[in-house]
Amino acid sequence: MLSELYIKNYLLVPEMRLSLDKGLTVISGETGAGKSIVAGSISLIFGDNLAGIEAFDKEQPIYLEVSYNLEKAEELNNFLAQNGIETEEELILAREISPNGKSGYYVNGRKVGVSLLKELKSYLIDFHHQRDQQRLLSPSYQLDLLDAYADLTRIREEFADLYRELKAGLKKLDELKKEAERQKEINELYRFQYEELETAKLRINEDVELQNEYELLSHTLEITELCNQITAELLEQENSVFDIISGYLSKLKHYEHLNPEIGYAVNNMQQALENLQEASLNLSRSKDNISFEPQHLQDIQARLDLINSLVHKHKVRSIEELLNLFAERSAQIAAFADNEKSIAELEKHLEKNFAGLREKGEELSRKRQKSAVELSKELQENIRALSIPEGILEIMIDKKAEDNFVISDYLSAVSESGQDSVEFLFSANPGFELKPLSAVVSGGELSRILLAIKKVLADRLEPKLIILDEIESGIGGKTAAIVADFIAKLAERQQVLCITHLAQIAGRAEKHLVIEKFTQGEKSFVNIRKVEAEQRLQEIARMLSGTLTAKALEHAAEILKDINIRG
């Protein structure tokens, strides 16, 4: 229950503290007196942004605060606990708006984000404005009302989650398929290049090794002849280099003891003879290892031609770059295969989710069908109690995706709210065809239908403050008294704050508050006061006729007397 509202520096209110009680509290006042300041202040605390927010003193911040007594509010207490808010019996919510327009939100003195206040609103407040009458004509709003009555919020959210996930998955699948289609032709080229390079079985530096071997084999004859010539001249023929050095060496040895340098020369010449012998062996072995085979030379040439053609074909500079290209094509082909695998896996996942979505949609439809019968019956009873004695109301539900097993078609047909469309059909008079509300109801009938909905929903929800902001459009006479009684009954279960022009409603209130606007100097102010006894009689008389005539006072007394008798 909202126990207190504190307003400071908002619009025409320098400071105001307002206590509220259980049951029905009514706020009345002249047109333009500022009756909606109270409802507007509460809306602002819960994160709404209203037009015309203005401070009484523009140099100071606006401060708005509500206090709640927590009783019989299990869902609310669970929500507060989940959000780490400790509270015992009182919950204090506040909003401060600085002169530069920035807002701070507070729960029990702790600064919080606006989103938390917006979520808290559904647990604590049920606003009913005149504009809600037009919302009632919307099939989507009618569906929301049915789901609230049937307590389908959780199932509907589960359907919405699956719907969004499936829609996002379908979009991703479409993107993957388009990408696969774009890559299909290029992937065929990549696969051809990959297979061509794989068949070539290239090795790093292979071209250099083959080129060296080709050069060697190409000069086999010249190398062999040169080796034979060198070997002969160094060792084998008469007066060979070896023989000449050996002769000189033999002569020098006789004098090496006479001069160290001659000794060094002898050693070096001895080493030279050994090197000549080793060189001769090297040449002999190299000659023996060279075998000229024309076919092998042709094979090397063919391999070099293949490598060179691949280098030229793929516009690279070396075999290393060819091998890099091979690795790149291998990765690209693998990525394409992964994409196709991802498509297959995603299709399987989407089919599974689609089955879950359809199942959840069918569950929603079944429960809506059942609840629609119950809700229409309860609404009809309450509408008839609101001076529409022959009123008939039925709720028509149409499935938008009957037997549709194509995911994209199903998603196009349904929405996040499910696979059903809802239409409230109404007739105020017997013998007339049931038609959508927008086609048949007057403003007064619409007000009463919405009141009936509030009453039916209030019977199913945890207690909260219902704010009725001038909802009596098109209502007067005997109907006004019936509506007043109806609101009073609603207030037996829920706390109700009603801003009204109807004297009959004001007469049924446990607490009657009057808002008045007055001027001091160049400043306008708003004051709110509780009226009782004679003051209340005078206010109800004013509401009836606009002036305090004897007849108006007599009529006001009859209203209060009649209420006290029925009370």
Image (cartoon, grey):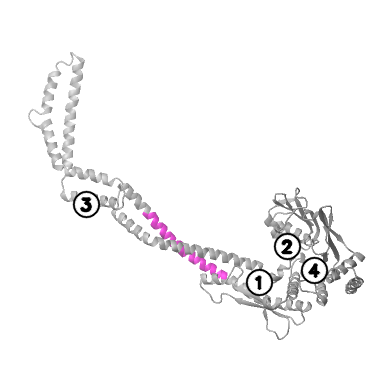
Looking at this rendering, what residue extends furthest in the bottom direction? 431
Cα–Cα span, label 4 and label 1 = 28 Å
Residue 496 in view, yes or no? no
Residue 125 in the image: x percent, y percent? 74, 63
Query: Circle 2 sits on which residue?
Result: 123
Left or right of 30 on screen, residue 320: left
- Viewer can see residue 202: yes
Residue occupied by mark 1? 138
Residues shaded magenta: 329-357
Residue 533, percent across and down? 92, 66
Which badge, 3 or 1, comes first in the chain's sequence? 1
Mark 2 secondary-structure assignment: helix
Q: Magenta includes 496?
A: no
Q: Secondary structure at mark 3?
A: helix
The quarter of the image holding the C terminus is bottom right
Residue type, mark 3 in image: Ala
Sequence order check: which comes first, mark 1 or mark 2?
2
Label 2 is placed on what type of residue? Tyr
Given contact means CB atoms under 8 Å apart, are the residues at marks 4 and 1 in contact?
Answer: no
Q: Disc 1 and disc 2: Cα gap in Å?
A: 24 Å
Amino acid type, callout 1: Ser
Compared to residue 1, the image places residue 210 above or below, namely: above
Q: Nearer the viewer, mark 4 or mark 3?
A: 4
Residue 396, horizontal then vertical, whole percent: 65, 78
Left or right, residue 173 beside residue 497: left
Measured as percent of width and height from the top left, residue 155 is found at: 63, 68
Q: Which-is-in-front pick, marks 4 and 1?
A: 1
Query: Which one is closest to the eye, mark 1 or mark 2?
Result: 1
Residue under label 3, please give it.
Answer: 302
Taking 239 as reference, is 540 left or right?
right
> Which of the 4 quarters of the picture holds residue 563?
bottom right
